[in-house]
Image (tube, grey):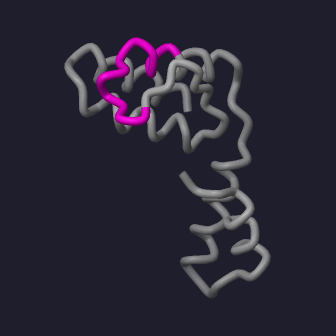
Amino acid sequence: MRDPSVIIALDRQPSSGYFYEVDQKIVASVTHPLSPEVVEMARRAVKDFHECFWWWNPDFVPETTEDVRDIVINLRKGGHRAWQRAKELNACL
């Protein structure tokens, strides 16, 4: 996961053209707050399908949209039920 302070520093010293737009989108996704429902849904998915996550931690709480997107990507590596949960979670973003 990216360190938001590094990304914000990139935003203060913009590169030219396309990359500057990408940097701003990354900053927006990192700083965009998640609803409590999405946080709980993502936390529950990690707990229910812990086999999809090499970093599994029972106390994990997602804090950014990027965290939730990483959960969706890892859920898609699991079976049909994990893939369905990824689809539901992705629809909330």
Residue 4, magenta (yes or no): no
**In the image, 8: left or right of 69?**
right
Quadrant hosting residue 75: top left
Q: Position of residue 88 (x, y in %)?
A: 43, 20
**In the image, 8: left or right of 85?**
right
Q: Position of residue 1 (x, y in %)?
A: 54, 51
Residue 50, magenta (yes or no): yes
| Magenta stretch bounds | 44-55
* Position of 66 relative to 42 (above/below): below
Q: Name the outermost residue toward the left.
A: 79
* Position of 17 relative to 58 (above/below): below
Q: Residue at position x 31%, y 28% from top? A: 52
Q: Nearer the viewer, residue 51 or 45?
A: 51
Quadrant hosting residue 51: top left
**In the image, 37: left or right of 18?**
right
**In the image, 81: left or right of 49?**
left
Q: Nearer the viewer, residue 53 or 34?
A: 53
Quadrant hosting residue 5: bottom right
Q: Nearer the viewer, residue 43 or 51?
A: 51
- The secondary structure that dominates the magenta segment is helix
Q: Residue at position x 30%, y 19% from top? A: 82
Q: Residue at position x 79%, y 76% from top? A: 12
Q: Residue at position x 70%, y 19% from top? A: 36
Quadrant holding the C terminus? top right
